[in-house]
Amino acid sequence: MRRLLLALGLLAALPAAAQAPAGGWSPTRPIRMVVPFPPGGGTDVVARIVATRLQEALGQPVVAENRPGAGGTIGTDAVAKAAPDGTTIGIATSSTHPAAVVLLRNVPYDPVISFAPITQIGVTPYILVGGPKAQGATLAEFLDHVRAHPGQIDYASVGSTTLGYLLTRQFELLTNTRMNHVPYRGSAQVYPDLLNGTVAVLLDNPTGSAGLVRDGQLRAFGVTTPSAILPEVPTFAQLGIDGFDAPFWYGLVAPAGTPRVVVDRIQQAVARHFTGTPEGRAELAAKDVTPIAGTADAFARTIAEDTARWRSLALRLGIQPE
C-alpha cells in the first residue's frame, strides 16, 4: 500500500512538473511594463504588442504604463529605481539608453549598470524623407542643392537631445553638407511642416512616413538599413555613403539586481512566444521592425557598445550635453 501511494503521488506530480517554466521562475503578480514615451508612437506600439505576448506566455497581466518626459529619461529612471523583483520591466530604446547619456546632462541613471538587460526585441532603420522644399528627385541631386546653399536648407528633428538629431549631424559630416536645424517636440508636428514646405527633410523611422512616401507626398532619399515596408528605397551604402548604417533598436530591461532566473525566463518567453514565431515576426515586420531574439548578455554588449559609439561621434561633432 505504501508503494502504491508513493507511485500515485509521483503520477500526480507529473503534470505540474511538465507545466513548470523552463527558466525556473513564474510570476505570481501582475507585471508593469514602463513605456517612457507617449501613447501612439512607435515605441508605444511595439511595447503593447510585446506586453500582450508576454501576458499570454507568463500567465499574468502585463500592463503597459506610459511615463513620458525628458526624452524618455523619466520613465526609464522609474524602471531603474523600481524593486528588482520581476514586477517592473521597461522598454529600452537607442534614445533612452546610449543616446540619452551622451546628449543630456544629469541623466539620473547609467545605461549599463542601472539595469539588468533582458533582450533586444528588434531594430528599425532610419529614413531620410523630403517634402516639396527638398530640391532634387534623388539623393545626389538633393545633396548638390544643399552644397550650393550651405546653411540655408532646413532639416527637422524632434530635438537636439535625440539620436535622430545626432545622426543627421553625422549625415552632414559624411556628405560634406551643412543644413539649418529646426527642432520640434515630436514627429506629429514635423510631418505637416514637411508637407507644406516649412522644412525640407527629416531623418526618422519609416513607420510614420511610409504611407506618405507611397502616396507620393514625400520623397524617400535613402535608408540606413533595408526597410521591410519600403523595400524599394536604397540604403545609403548603396548610394555611396559608407558608415551611415545605424538602426534604431527596441529592447526590454529590468532594474539592476533583478535575479538572473527572472531575466532569463522573460527573455525566453519573448523569444519563444513572440520574436521567434512566424506570427510575431510578421507582426513586427508590419511595423518595419526586424526581430532579434537576443540573449541578455548580447543586449548588454549592444548597449555598452552603442553608448561608446555615440559618445565618440558627439565628441567628433563638438556636441555638448544639454
Image (tube, helix red, strand yellow):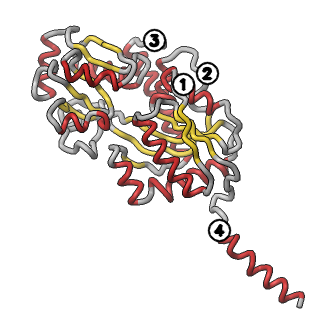
Assess whether mark 3 and mark 2 are in contact (beta carbons under 8 angstroms).
Answer: no
The residue tagged 4 is 19
**SS under mark 4:** helix
Which residue is the extreme one toward the bottom? Answer: 1
Instruction: Work out how far the residue at label 1 is from the one at label 4, CA to CA, in angstroms.
Output: 38 Å
**Residue 255 image-quadrant placement:** top right
Three-letter amino acid code at disc 1? Thr
Name above or below for residue 259 compared with residue 208.
Answer: below
**Mark-to-mark CA distance, 1 and 3:** 18 Å
| Residue type indicated by callout 2 | Pro
**Crowding near pointer 4: few (<14 within 10 Å), some, many (20+)?**
few
Q: Name the residue under label 1.
A: 73
Tag 3 secondary structure? loop
Q: Where is residue 211 in the image (x, y as percent from the top left)?
A: 23, 38
Q: Residue 108 carries which label?
A: 2
Instruction: State the residue at coordinates (12%, 16%).
Output: 145
User: Is there a contact, CB below 8 Å, between mark 1 and mark 4?
Assistant: no
- Residue at 24% across, 14% down: 154
Would residue 72 be found to the left or right of residue 114 on screen? Answer: left
Distance between the Cα atoms at labels 3 and 4?
Answer: 53 Å
Q: What residue type is labelled 3?
A: Gln
- Give me the C-alpha separation between circle 4 and circle 2: 41 Å
Q: Which residue appears at 43% of the width and 25% of the height?
A: 310
